Image (spheres, rainbow, N blue to C red):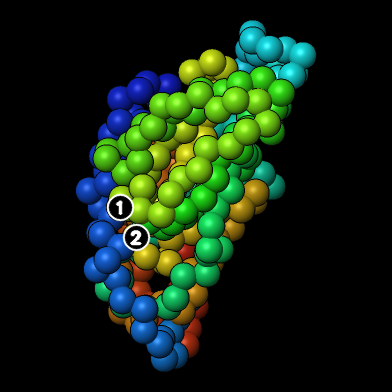
Amino acid sequence: MKVSQSFSLISCSLLFLAAGLAAAADYKVVPVSNGGTVSGRVSLNGPAPAPVMLKIDEDKAVCGADRPSEEFLVGANRGVQNVVLSIETVAAGKDWKLPATFVYDQKSCTFVPRMIMIKPEMEGEVLNSDSVGHNFHTISQGVYNINKKIQPNAKLVVAKGQIRRSGMIRAKCDIHSWMGGWWVVADTPYTVITDKDGNFSIGEVPPGTYTLKIWHEKLGESKQNVVVKAGETAKVDVVLKL
């Protein structure tokens, strides 16, 4: 994997995830008897690169000073945050553990959180907690595309069913060009996002042999096999290359 600043990597990543995720309607919630766990850590193979500094050149009184980009967050022991891992081809299994609705905020001209996990047809709100307007703009392969001004201290309502299927949604603001974020629309509950130290855990996995898909917004995507045994934990340590 290589770090790329190009829009083509984002486009390819969106296509990859859109093609690789099944429709949520195909997934069935059933009791999982003596399931296994896939857990581990995602890390870099070398020192983290210096963060890209974002130039704050609009509404500085509200947005603040120049700041480091959050597109490449590396924690303790080179652990990589905001890596999306999903176990493919699980047709039936555990229930979702997501809230009934989601909230995605804009504070100090930053998306909070940068990356959020939701599911198809989920309803929610995009808040603007700032005293300046934002132009909320999403890019996806037909998952949820919108380009709309949100007034100061107002919100955008995402109605049930507007997020039509699983895939990746890139969020940006056309007024404040440095703002960036992602919505991970998972097709099954067997998708997770790494924490600040690169750790992850996926529980209640039906025993079997699977493909684990790994995606990071700057390092691209990869896959590796994992064998899940009943009542056991499959340890998977992923090393990403710069």
Q: Nearer the viewer, residue 20 or 173?
A: 173
Left/right of residue 235 with respect to residue 74 in the rendered view: left
Instruction: Please name the residue shown 35% across and 53% down the image.
Output: 161
Which residue is at the front of the view, 153 or 83? 153
**Tag 1–tag 2 contact (CB < 8 Å):** yes
Rendered image: mark on residue 165: 1
Q: Disc 2 designates what residue?
A: 187
Residue 140 lies, in percent from the top left, at: 33, 36
Tell me the SS state at disc 1.
loop
The single residue placed furthest to the bottom in the displayed view is 33
Under circle 2, the secondary element is: loop
Q: Quadrant of residue 16?
A: top left
Indicate the quadrant where residue 130 lies: top right
Q: Amino acid at mark 2?
A: Asp
Q: From the image, which quarter does the N terminus lie in?
A: top left
- Category of crowding for the residue at label 2, using alpha-carbon neighbours closer than 10 angstroms: few (below 14), some (14–19), many (at least 20): many
Q: Which of the labelled discs sits on residue 174, or is there none? A: none
Report the front residue among 105 and 219.
105
Can residue 9 be seen in the rendering of this structure? yes
Depicted 36 relative to depicted 70: above or below: below
